[in-house]
Structures are given as structure tokens and as C-alpha cells.
Image (cartoon, rainbow, N blue to C red):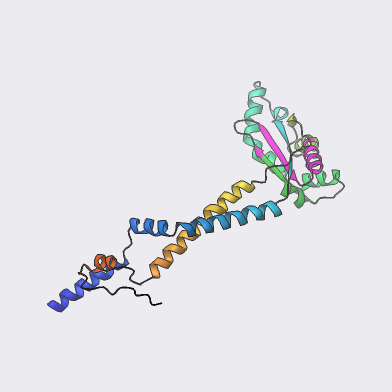
Amino acid sequence: MQTQDKSKTNIENTKKESEISVVDIINMMLTFWWFIVILAVLVGGATYTYFKITATPEYKSSARLLINTEGQQTSTDVNTNAMTGAKNMLPTYIEVLQSKNFLNTVSDDLDNKYTVEDIKGMLTLEAVTDTNIIKIEVLNEDAHVSYLICSSIVNNAKSEITRVFGGGTSEPTEWPEESSKSEPLHTARNAVIGLLAGAIVAMIIIFLVNMFDTRVKSKDELVAKYGLPILGEIPNLEFN
């Protein structure tokens, strides 16, 4: 019976040893706060430096196209039906404007200096919510190239839409312009992300090291773990 009680007590003690409360974790982090700060600053600084050195400034040229399917309507309420039809068809129009056939036309305008895949990588087309307008954005390291590609898309969109759909049209509501200012590089944002990542990695390291550290560090820890009194303590003697 006593053996069973001892065994039960040992199991309970083992469980207590393996249990780590939220307070214990917080104390771990507070004890090694300096390590968290150092690693966070190192990773954040390295991230900032990396993006500052390697990031290439890009220039954006943008435009907006109003899509109108009026030419395809037979109803007396032409304008309302045209707008509703255009809204519903915007994803299809976008697919046409980023198709290989259409982008080949754009590439021809630029003397084939850029392939269809190159242009696709620079181009963003999206529908403006609750409108029948398509927003066009082109990003490139050269502001003039962005402007030329965006202008070519706007100039050729009307004939392409008419050809594919047999009616309808597109009119620019916003013409492209050549940007004199590059887009933000977000180096500060990336540095903050690096800072947080460094702090998280440091906390994980601290937690794992403490999890696998089985050494007894104080008499209070022994009392807390086993609930037994300390009969004696050997002092740490230093000899000169």
C-alpha cells in the first residue's frame, strides 16, 4: 500500500515538474528580456538593411476605363441596362484586356521590347466596386515605360472590346500620366516585421531552453516541486 502511495506521489510530482504556468512563462521572458531585445534589434536591423540595399524603386502609371455595353442593348431603358450589363461583364472584359492576343498588341506598340509575360508581371487590372469602371495600374523601374504601357492599353482597349464583343465600347475617365515619384519601398514596415520576428524567435528559444533545463536552481524550487522541507544547504564557497 505504501509502495502504491509512493508511486502515486512520484507521478504527481513528475506532472508538477512538467507543468508550466503562464506566470512561469512570463517570468522566463522577463528574466531574459535583454536577449529578446538584442535578437529583435539584430533581426529588425538586418531586415531594414537588406530591403534598403536590394529594393528597387518602381514607378506607377494608372488609368481608368468606363465600360459601356450600350451598343449591345435593345431595351428602351438603354443606359440603365448598359450599366448593369457592364458591371456583370467586368471580369470578362478584364480577361480580354489581359489576354495574350491583346497584350501582343501592346508589346508591338513598344517595338516588342517587352514580352507578353513581362507586361503581365507589370500590369494590374481590377474592377472598381459598384461601378462599370476598370482600374489599370502598371509598375516598372522606368517611369516612362510604365506610362507607355498604360497608354497603349487605354488606346487599344476600345477596338479590342468592340472586336471581341461585337459591340460596346470603353472610354477613359482617367488618363495615364508619367510619374515623377517612385512608389514607397516599405522598408520601415519590413523592419518592424523583422523586429517582431526576432522577438518571437528569441522567446521560442528561451522557452525551449528552459523546458529542457532539468537543473535545480534554488531551494525554493525544490520545495515548490516536491513539497518537502529543506534540512540543510551547502553554501557556494569561493577559494582565492
Viewport quadrant of the C terminus: bottom left
* Residue at (65% x, 37% y) in the render: 90
Q: Position of residue 148 (x, y in %)?
A: 81, 40
Q: Residue furthest left?
A: 1
* Residue at (57% x, 57% y) in the render: 43
Q: Is residue 69 above or below residue 117?
A: above
Depth order, front residue of 183/191: 191
Viewport quadrant of the N terminus: bottom left
The quarter of the displayed image where residue 152 is located: top right
> Left of 94 or right of it: where is 216?
left
> Left of 73 or right of it: where is 16?
left
- Assess whether residue 135 is covered by the magenta stretch: yes
Looking at the rendering, the stretch of residues picked out in magenta corresponds to: 126-154
Q: Position of residue 150 (x, y in %)?
A: 77, 39
* Residue at (56% x, 51% y) in the render: 193
Q: Residue furthest top?
A: 76
> Left of 197 or right of it: where is 240?
left
The quarter of the displayed image where residue 105 is located: top right
Q: Position of residue 97 (x, y in %)?
A: 73, 42
* Residue at (73% x, 30% y) in the render: 174
